[in-house]
Amino acid sequence: MKCSLFKKNQGLTLIELLISLAILAIISFSIYHTITQTFRLRNRLLLENEFHTTLCFAIRCLQKDIALLYSPIPFFCPSHHLPAFLEKGFGLQNAPFWGEALDETKMRPARFVGTKNRLLFITTSHLRIYSENLESEFAQVIYEVKDLGPPKNETLLKIENPNAFELYPSQDLPQTQSELLTNIKNLNFTYLLQKGNTWKESPTWDNSALGTLNCFPDLIKMEIELKSPKNIHFKGEFKFTYEIPLVELSPYF
């Protein structure tokens, strides 16, 4: 009787204990692996979300500024007839953001200058935050790609000056510089002009130069490729145009 009770209370054997520990280790490793993978996936999703949110914000900035392109004198495409005094000009030289005066009032058209990785124009998308500030919805805007070195490397910058009607902006004038996109592998602007049913592409644009004098491009195409340090890759194409039919607003037709 005593022997039977002793056997019932003697506990686990060494083999049973080792088996239990092995099962516990397997379960613990499985739980650890699942939790680790979950956190890795979470971090990856957060990085991708931040990457695409930043891209969408940059595209929205471009879209809004280009949609609200401004010029006090509408631009005319070469296919339209220009009044004689608009063709001749009145002797005042081009400024960085303003073209040559086109009539007796000395009113200047706003310039639109574009290269492979730079845009310069006047927009009416500026937000006036403080009422005491001497500014309005008009702004001089430059988008350009610059190499800022690692870790940002090639970066798309937006430089905005609310003193839109200054002919020659100085460094003393208040302006903001925003870094919109970093780690740009390739960015290329192309400018398109519609002629009938065909589109003519140009790698550069200057509405104060011959061939594109007093003319906006009908479409601005941007091809972009990004690759972040976290190996997130994006390659795509975006197209922008202005909202207002400028030719129809001309006071000369």
Image (spheres, rainbow, N blue to C red):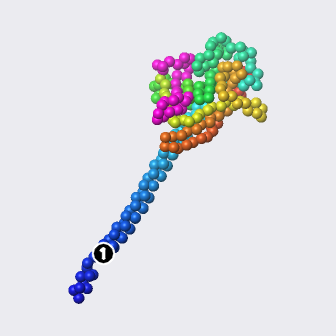
93 vs 21, nearest the viewer: 21
Q: Residues within 10 Å of mark 1 (few under 14, many from 20)?
A: few
- Please name the amino acid that badge 1 sits on: Thr
Residue 165 in sight:
yes
The verdict on residue 145 being magenta is yes
Q: Name which residue lies at 52% across and 24% down.
A: 161
Q: Residue furthest bottom?
A: 1
Q: Which residue is mark 1?
A: 13
For the residue labelled by badge 1, is the local secondary structure a helix, a strand or a loop?
A: loop
Residue 158 in sight:
no
Q: Name which residue lies at 48% across and 19% down.
A: 171
Identify the magenta region.
Answer: 144-173
Indicate whether 233 appears above or below 166. Answer: below
Q: Name which residue lies at 61% across and 32% down.
A: 188
Indicate whether 238 appears above or below 31. Answer: above
The verdict on residue 171 being magenta is yes
Indicate whether 54 appears above or below 158. Answer: below
95 vs 2, nearest the viewer: 2
What is the tally of numbered marks visible in this picture?
Answer: 1
Q: Position of residue 152 (x, y in %)?
A: 48, 34
89 vs 249, nearest the viewer: 89
- Report the side of 82 relative to 189 (left or right): right
Q: Position of residue 223 (x, y in %)?
A: 62, 36
